[in-house]
Image (cartoon, helix red, strand yellow):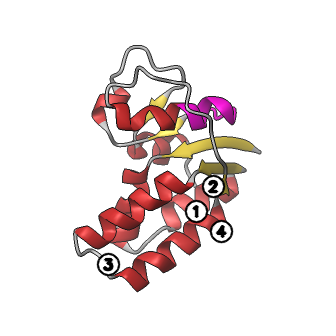
């Protein structure tokens, strides 16, 4: 089993599409365990509701589902040089849980020169882990 981190923007993208299968199938086939925390889950919930992509009930169900397919942890705040300070926790989660990479569609994270963990896009992930 390999730990990975999936950024909130990726969970939101698949939740909006109402088709988590492209992610879930690869997680199972390649024995990948997504790591998450309550902050990331809260961010997913908030964005889905605030943008009216889902109501609170649907968003809550989405969070329950994500909790079932991830390992929820609490990290220590250590990392402090992310291009967006709100994303420092992503590197903390990834480092402290031995993640092999982060999946994010945030171009600032992907092009960040000092990243301690590789950051890849969802398109990279889908190509790198074919079914």
Q: Earlier in the sequence, mark 2 or mark 4?
A: 2
Up-down relation of residue 67 to residue 107 (above or below): below
Q: Is residue 56 left or right of residue 76?
A: left
Residue topped by disc 1: 24
The residue under the point 42% across, 85% down is: 57
Residue topped by disc 2: 27
- How far, Cα to Cα, is label 1 from label 3? 20 Å
Q: Position of residue 87 (x, y in %)?
A: 40, 36
Count up the numbered dots.
4
The crowd level at tag 2 (other Cα within 10 Å; few <14, some 14-19, many 20+) is many
- Asked if disc 2 and disc 1 are in contact, CB closer than 8 Å, the reply is yes
Q: Earlier in the sequence, mark 3 or mark 2?
A: 2
Q: Is residue 4 left or right of residue 54?
A: right
The crowd level at tag 1 (other Cα within 10 Å; few <14, some 14-19, many 20+) is few
Up-down relation of residue 22 to residue 64 (above or below): above
Nearer the observer, 46 or 17: 46
16 magenta-colored: no
Nearer the observer, 67 or 21: 67
- How far, Cα to Cα, is label 1 from label 4? 11 Å
Q: Judging from the image, what secondary structure is the residue with disc 1 in? A: helix
Residue topped by disc 3: 54
- Asked if disc 2 and disc 4 are in contact, CB closer than 8 Å, the reply is no
Q: Position of residue 21 (x, y in %)?
A: 52, 68
Query: Which stretch did the figure color magenta?
Result: 92-100
Q: Is residue 9 left or right of residue 79?
A: left
96 magenta-colored: yes
Residue topped by disc 4: 68
The crowd level at tag 4 (other Cα within 10 Å; few <14, some 14-19, many 20+) is few
């Amino acid at each position: 089993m390999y730990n990975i981190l999936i950024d909130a923007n990726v969970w939101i993208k698949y939740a909006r599409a109402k088709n988590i299968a492209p992610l879930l199938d690869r997680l199972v086939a390649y024995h990948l365990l997504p790591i998450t925390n309550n902050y990331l889950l809260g961010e997913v919930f908030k964005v889905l509701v605030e943008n009216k992509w889902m109501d609170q009930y649907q968003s809550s169900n989405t969070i329950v589902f994500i909790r079932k397919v991830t390992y929820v942890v609490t990290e220590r705040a250590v990392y402090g040089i992310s291009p967006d300070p709100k994303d420092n926790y992503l590197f903390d989660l990834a480092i402290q849980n031995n993640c092999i990479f982060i999946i994010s569609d945030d171009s600032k994270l992907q092009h960040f020169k000092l990243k301690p963990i590789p950051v890849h896009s969802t398109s990279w992930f889908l190509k790198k882990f074919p079914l």
